Image (cartoon, rainbow, N blue to C red):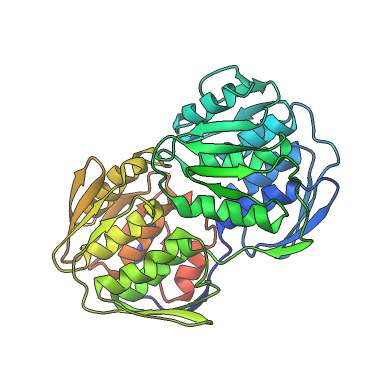
Amino acid sequence: MDITITPSPLSGKISAISSKSDAHRLLICAGLCAGETTKIHITDTSKDIDATAGVLRSMGANITRESEYFLVASPENFTLSPVCDCCESGSTLRFLLPVVAAACGSGYFSGSGKLPDRPISELMSAMGSHGVNFSSDKLPFSISGRMSGGEFLIPGNISSQYISGILLSLPLSGGGGIQLTTVLESSSYVDMTVSTMNSFGVKVAGTANGWLVPADSQYKSPLCISAEGDWSNGAFFLAAGALGGDIQMSGLSSTSLQGDKKITSILHSFGAHVVSDENFVTVKCGDLSSLEIDISNIPDLLPILAVTAAFARGETRFYGGARLRLKESDRLAATSSMLSSLGGHCLELPDGLIVSGGGLSGGIVNGCNDHRIVMAAAIAGAFCQSPVTIVGAQAVEKSYPEFFRDFRALGGIANVI
């Protein structure tokens, strides 16, 4: 699907969709509460969320969707050798690979798109040291050998999802702990995992250089629980407010552990007018000027922050983002290409970008099968001088299938061609 965006500033009120990151964790914990049923409020689903639900079903969970809720009935006994299609979801693979190894003892994993090429070797190595065998070093592969608990040594600078996956699995394998072998990046995502596990009765303790899950830990259903609003996807529309609109977004918690809630402070630092209260986050345009931004803990914000920088005065430097080359696309290269295609000026660095301000003209953007590139290009298009055509706009279905519905509701003009 290709879409053309006709310039038209966005403004108005909108509700944040449920956090994809939170939804993954809630579904998994609910699926591990032996014999119990959990009702989870998740306003919108997506391909990634559905992939996690699909793998949990293959493990024996009964998962149904009713209006804005998922009902998750956990099995008394897990399926032996489940067939696990992770689709294109890195979260699904990295979270549930250790869980299946601990709960089922064997299984078959597959994936599509760029997922088979995304990093997983360090997680496989850690699991291998705890009794898990792999038929191949990349997807698709079979696993055999029930994963034991104990101490895991995991790097923290490649994917925080490795840590989350091991933590989620430890109550199923007799407990244990994680020791980091490098500095942890995207630490907020591990904090989210720990918080969700606590909500399901598993008390994860922090240690000097990692975490510990007690040997007697068991998942217990809270019966009913809600996913938070999504700061990562909400950031696109909040940035639209900074670029020339007036956006009010409800459903975002100021006490959230999501790292991407930093979008408000960054937009304020750019020069936008930002006000947060218990009901709304409001962002209005301002006189934007350049910044230096460390994206090591907020990598998903790069595409929309780069678009914001393109409309600011001066040069904005992004650094600390080497891991972005391992996302759905090489997100540093894809963001640079997007801005260049729209008439901007961007210098690609090994771990970041230098974006020149002054505005964007318009043009044709390749979505690179990356939902965040497509959404960033759409927001850019609303403020370009001439129309923007996005090739492969269906990539938004990965995390935000109704993005263009909400884009139009705020006054955006988006036509499928």
Residue 264 point in image, percent of width and height: 38, 71
- Residue 231 drawn at (x, y percent): 48, 64
Q: Position of residue 341 (x, y in %)?
A: 23, 51
Hey, which residue is sitting farthest top in the picture? 135
At horizontal 53% and vertical 34% (from top left) the residue drawn is 112
Tell me if 218 is positioned left or right of 158 in this view: right
**How many numbered tags mark residues here?**
0
> Is 148 situated above or below 95?
above
Residue at the extreme front = 208
Outermost residue to the left: 314
Q: Residue, x 62% and y 33% (percent of image)?
A: 97
Above or below — where is 306 with respect to 12?
A: above
* Image quadrant containing the C terminus: bottom left
**At 71% across and 34% down in the image, what residue appears?**
173
Whether residue 196 is situated above or below residue 108 in the rendered picture: below
Residue 266 visible within the image: yes
Residue 7 in view here:
no
Front residue of 375/108: it is 108
Q: Is residue 82 left or right of residue 152?
A: right
> Residue 99 sits in which quadrant?
top right
Q: Residue at x 68, y 28 (%)?
A: 148
x and y percentages locating residue 399 in the rendered image: 52, 54
Residue 74 or residue 243, whichever sits in front? 74
